[in-house]
Amino acid sequence: MLNDRQYFPTLSALLFQIKSNMKQKKLLTMALSLLFPLLLSAQNPFLKLKAGDWFKMQVILRPQGSLLADGHSVIDRGAEEMDKNQYDLRFVLVKHLANGNEQYQVTLERVKFKRRGNDGTWYGYDSFYPSYLQGNGDTLSRLIRTLEIDAAGKIIKFDHQQQTYPPINMSEIGPKKFIRSTVISFDPLPSFLFQNIVSYISREIKKANIRALNGSFNAELRNLIGWGNIQNDVSLLTIAASFPLPQNVVIKGRILNAFTTGNKPEIYTDQGIIKINADGTFEAKMLVTQPSPVLFIYGQNPLCAIKPFIKPGDTLIINADAKNYQDGSAAHGESTTSPFSESVSYAGSGASDALIDKQLTNLYTNQMQPFANRRASVVPVEEFMAYQEKGKKEFNALMDANKNTASKTALEYYNAEWMYLQAQAKLYFLFLKEYRYSPQSGAAFAGFPENYFTAIDDLPILTDDYANSDWYKSCVEWLHNYRSARLSIINGGQSGFLVDHASALASFKGYALYLALSNVLREALHKSSWQNSKMIKPYYLNFINNCGDSALTKPLIKQWERLQAWEPGKPSPVKNTVLTNGKMLNLEQFKGKNICLIVNYAAGEDLEQYRDFIKKHDPAKVQFVILQLKASAAYTIDKSFLNLPNVSYYEVDGSNKNMSWLDIEGGESSVLFFDKWLRVVDDVLDLGSKIIINSTTNKKEFDIHKLDNALKKAEATPRFSKVQKAKFYTVLGWSTCSILFSFVIGYFIYRNRLAKIKRDITLQKRIKELEIKAIRSQMNPHFIFNSLNSIQSLINNGQYKQANIYLEKFAVMMRKVLNNSEKTLVALSEELDAVMLYCQLEQLRFDFAFKLNVENGLNTNLIEIPGMLIQPLVENAIVHGLAQKGSSGNLEINIYTEAGYLKVAVTDNGPGFKDMIFSTESFGLKLVAERLAILKADASEAKMTISNHTDKTGVTVTLTLPDN
């Protein structure tokens, strides 16, 4: 029992601990609240978007609760496909706004519909694959809207004024039973539906609710998208982005004996390699954008391959045993089953779907293997059909056994796959039979049971949800051959690109048409030389302009651009080719000789056929460069042939990246020609397929006529072709004309500018003259006023004789002033005469002595200065300096040159200036200063300085003028 001393300290410690824990929890809560947005942002890439980032969402709508009915056959299941709407929306972040909101551009890239009419006819529409317009020069247009959302994803602005999606016409997509054309026209995307979908997506990405965008059907969105009385199941799935998307599938499990076998302890998938731990366990996450089987291969061994069906959001646990993995038997198509695949078991949310593939393996094997070779051509048709009917019953039983455990999506997928595989088996069987019931049949397709072609003709290929699957694409290719064979009965058995192109247009529409046309164009471009491609060009451009699916157009565009690089006259496109010895192929070393490049992907011994062709050409003029596929080089190659002086032999691995400049496949040969300047001359493609066996010599041969012509063309190629010369002279002519035209234009511009400068100078000069005249007009009255004052003073003092003399001299001086009044510049001699007269006049008033000194050799008649410029200085010296001195006053005027300047110094012995500031009465000096300021504006260095004598008995005013 605790006493009081022990009890209270313990309670205090306990209370302190509680408080401490509460503080820690509070701090932890605060820290989590601060870190949560960062953790959320790290997990959700949508919260870290920058301007230019984009993502694409796929929206699926279909009637709520659509399920397959029990007890239906395979064909019934195909007919029970449900209505479905698909919208592919591309969101592009345009910019982050100053108010914290974001502006997006939303493009409706694809609209896909499937409807079943009241009469049971299926109708469909897919904007990626519109009705094929031949001669179409316009590319597809798409609906684009702009919206602004806040930080919570709420739409603030939604542009309703932009274009709306036009009504669509859904056409029949099922097999035609009547000669008719029925369409259903309706609005595919009402404005409210589009806005509701966009609003939901923007909210969920801001809430970091990635689960809502993983392809699962969404109950909340179902309520937002009610279309009349129809309730739709709705799913959203992010299918592409400019940034890494969150992975939505978890794959984990364990492989026993993974390290005790010869296989690498790795699992290879379409999305990379999964490493296996030392205890055999593994775990990885994947991004699945479309429900489909995913291939897993343990240790790169095809015997250890499985292909479980996986949906976005699945968790799949895979357990297997790698012991005795090499024991196996034929299975699924051309692959095999083994103890490894038999040991595989599944768990997790995706287990029921994944298990179907394992159950189907043996069924697929048993169905395909007996008729997988040409021996099947002797099998009676009835036996083949009975075997297929047996397989159909087994498949239906297997599907019924899984209907309560597997997902509706997986069941739909395997129903479609089985339907296509059985149809493809029939098409292959027809091919082996050469479309004849028996060797004795007189006509193609005659004698077959009526129901043989039903499963083929009724395939729903025109709008199918699994168009990206390999079995769909393969089946369309076989179906095209089948329909072409039917048409060949009418066209007399013609073949070639134009026939294949026409038969595709006549046989399909929708995706199947575009897939068939892309196959036809790809094959034609592969077999074409540059010259032949000109015939294909209109068909190629039609396809590119009509098709909205980049998965079909991009490979063709790349193939077309690669072929156009071989246009004669262009520089060699052979670049970045790494040889098996690690060195780069360099054709520049052979420049100066014509080059014949032989690319041989056939057996190495086939090169022997070029021996005679090579030996008959001069080694000094032609270099033969041989690129041999290393995998086919094991065949015997005559070394003496490769040691010829004009033969250079190299081996390549043949990878697509390494040989990206040439479209060539295994078993083919191409011969390419370059002139001395390494320009393309000609290309002879797929030569290997044209090799024949000479029945006399039993040797491989081919017609070398084309090769001889191409080499002759290379030898005859001039440095500059006629086209190049024409272009050169055209460029030269245009350049010369442009230079002359530019010179003429420049000359006129120069003249106009020079004239303008002269006009401006004249105008400025005139303005200065007017300004000077205005100042002089002020100086003349000032001088006259002072002179009249002097005459008046003489008369008032009774000095009439002096007044008469003064008046006479005043008249002479006024005549000089008036004569010079219209001149900007006057001779210095005239200016000094006026100054002398003025001094003589002023001597009558003020008895002072004056002296005028002119530097020896200075010609005053040749020097010009602004008129009435010296007189104000002399007047200022007399009136303000000598007037009070009487006979003791002295005035001295000195004219001389110094350092290239004319200087006029006026010196008096008066009282001088106080504080070196102009008197308010010295109006003449101010006018002189203003005139000098104008002269300075004209870049003339004219100035006036005033200095008191050191003994304060006079002032010297010096006027400095440029001597010119």
Image (cartoon, rainbow, N blue to C red):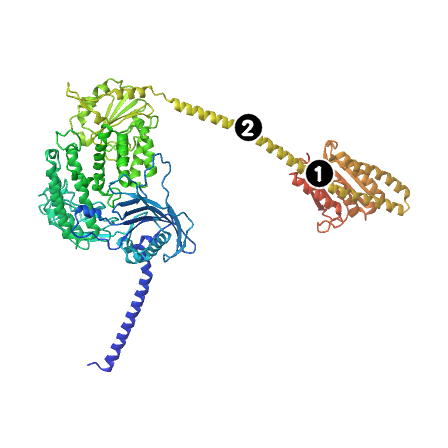
337 sits left or right of 654 in the view:
left
Residue receiving disc 1: 769
Distance Cα–Cα, label 1 vs label 2: 37 Å
Please indicate, yes or no, whether residue 566 appears anywhere in the rendered image.
no
> Callout 2: few (<14), some (14-19), or many (20+) C-alpha neighbours within 10 Å?
few
Of badges 1 and 2, the one in the foreground is 2
Residue 536, position as x, y percentages in the image: 31, 30
301 sits left or right of 932 in the view:
left
> Which of disc 2 and disc 1 is earlier in sequence?
2
| In the depicted structure, whether residue 628 falls above or below residue 383 | above
The secondary element bearing badge 2 is classed as helix
856 sits left or right of 732 in the view:
right
| In the depicted structure, whether residue 594 falls above or below residue 95 | above
Name the residue type under label 2.
Answer: Val
Residue receiving disc 2: 744
Name the residue type under label 1.
Answer: Glu
Location of residue 791 by image quarter: top right
Please name whichever residue, 814 or 572, is drawn nearer the observer in this view of the structure. Answer: 572
513 sits left or right of 638 in the view:
right
Please name whichever residue, 399 or 532, is drawn nearer the observer in this view of the structure. Answer: 399
Residue 322, position as x, y percentages in the image: 11, 47
| In the depicted structure, whether residue 911 falls above or below residue 534 | below
Residue 580, position as x, y percentages in the image: 22, 32
Location of residue 211 by image quarter: bottom left
Please indicate, yes or no, whether residue 391 appears anywhere in the rendered image.
yes
> Callout 1: few (<14), some (14-19), or many (20+) C-alpha neighbours within 10 Å?
some
Look at the image and tell me in which quarter the N terminus lies.
bottom left
Residue at 57 percent across and 29 percent down: it is 747
Residue 426, position as x, y percentages in the image: 16, 38
Query: Can you name the residue that lies furthest to the bottom here?
Result: 4
